[in-house]
Image (tube, rainbow, N blue to C red):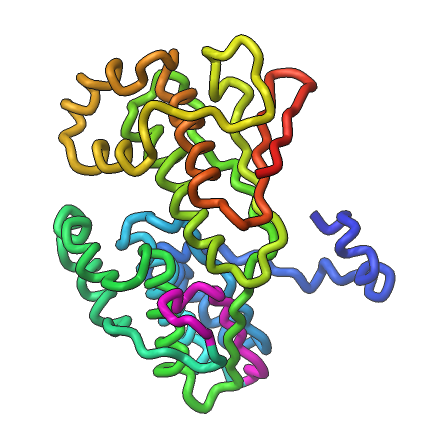
Amino acid sequence: MFSDTLFKRLAEDQPNFTEKVVVIVGDCYDPNLGLSAEDEELLVANIHVVIHCAATITFNGPLKRACFINVRSTRDLLLMAQRMPNLKSFVYVSTAFSNPNESLIKEIIYNCHIKAETLIDIVENLPESIVTSITPQIIGKWPNTYTLSKAVAENLIKDYGKNMPISISRPCVDVVIHCAATISFNGPLKRACFINVRSTRDLLLMAQRMPNLKSFVYVSTAFSNPNESLIKEIIYNCHIKAETLIDIVENLPESIVTSITPQIIGKWPNTYTLSKAVAENLIKDYGKNMPISISRPCVGNNIDIIDV
């Protein structure tokens, strides 16, 4: 890693800089960041600057995971930092979307309807099935578990960071390249819909609020419309709307979804190709007036780019 161009200038100025690098084993999912007692004391005694940018950025991930990684780890690190005698700076990397319900984000910490300790207590002590069932009530007006967890963590900074040299960074996104997908051709329709369709919709809704957005690239597939003998650089209509498909897989038992999958996919050969076709139509419906394009890579050297 240290042979990378990123470290070239540093290596020229301080050829032995790697001798100052100490690797610490930890896991932000675990209490106290998964640190051993010895490593914790090593950090407390020697650290001058803390930059806390570790996070799970899965928008609709389980609330338990979002809380442990984004909230509890922040609290535990703040408690550790309070004991650092040489601390010069603590930088918490949040997100520009920690308060997406505000039309104008000011450089203040907005109050959240749930305290960090309350949220931590819930996810630590209730069965995960119950936490999952009450997640919509817990996140309230926040669109997903990720944005709520970052808002809660910002309030931790306010509560635990008093009299500390602390700051919050809220980075924004200028370019979105959405290529995450499940590519299991005949996988469960529910999984294909959640990963390939619902995530695209949620990311588009988020992108609509990005004031500095320069480009949104959606990576589809050359096989999103396999029934067409010639694929043109247009978005082909699909027999089922994204919202209809999402509503079906969110609300019907999986056994029923599985039984009606052949009827839902219709002339598409599998769940994967249908999900990508539906997602392309999402781009058309939600991407109006956005700097957006669709890439349809093929297994080979040809790539179609569609400007929407």
Of residue 81 and residue 306, the one placed in the foreground of this image is: 306
Percent across and percent down for residue 231 are 57, 17
Measured along the vertical axis of the image, is residue 274 above or below residue 145? above
Where's the C terminus, which quadrant? top right
Percent across and percent down for residue 22 are 61, 60
For image coordinates 41% across by 66% down, the residue present is 98
Image quadrant of residue 149? bottom left
Percent across and percent down for residue 91 are 53, 74
Question: How many numbered tags mark residues here?
Answer: 0
Q: Is residue 269 left or right of residue 14?
A: left
Measured along the vertical axis of the image, is residue 67 above or below residue 283? below
Of residue 282 and residue 40, the one placed in the foreground of this image is: 282
Of residue 212 and residue 23, the one placed in the foreground of this image is: 212
Tell me if I can see residue 30 in this picture: no
Measured along the vertical axis of the image, is residue 102 above or below residue 130? below
For image coordinates 29% across by 74% down, the residue present is 112
Tell me if I can see residue 284 in this picture: yes
Magenta residues, dominant SS class: loop
The verdict on residue 98 being magenta is yes
Magenta-drawn segment: 86-105
The verdict on residue 94 being magenta is yes
Of residue 182 and residue 21, the one placed in the foreground of this image is: 182
Q: Residue furthest right?
A: 12
Image quadrant of residue 174? bottom right
Measured along the vertical axis of the image, is residue 292 above or below residue 77? above
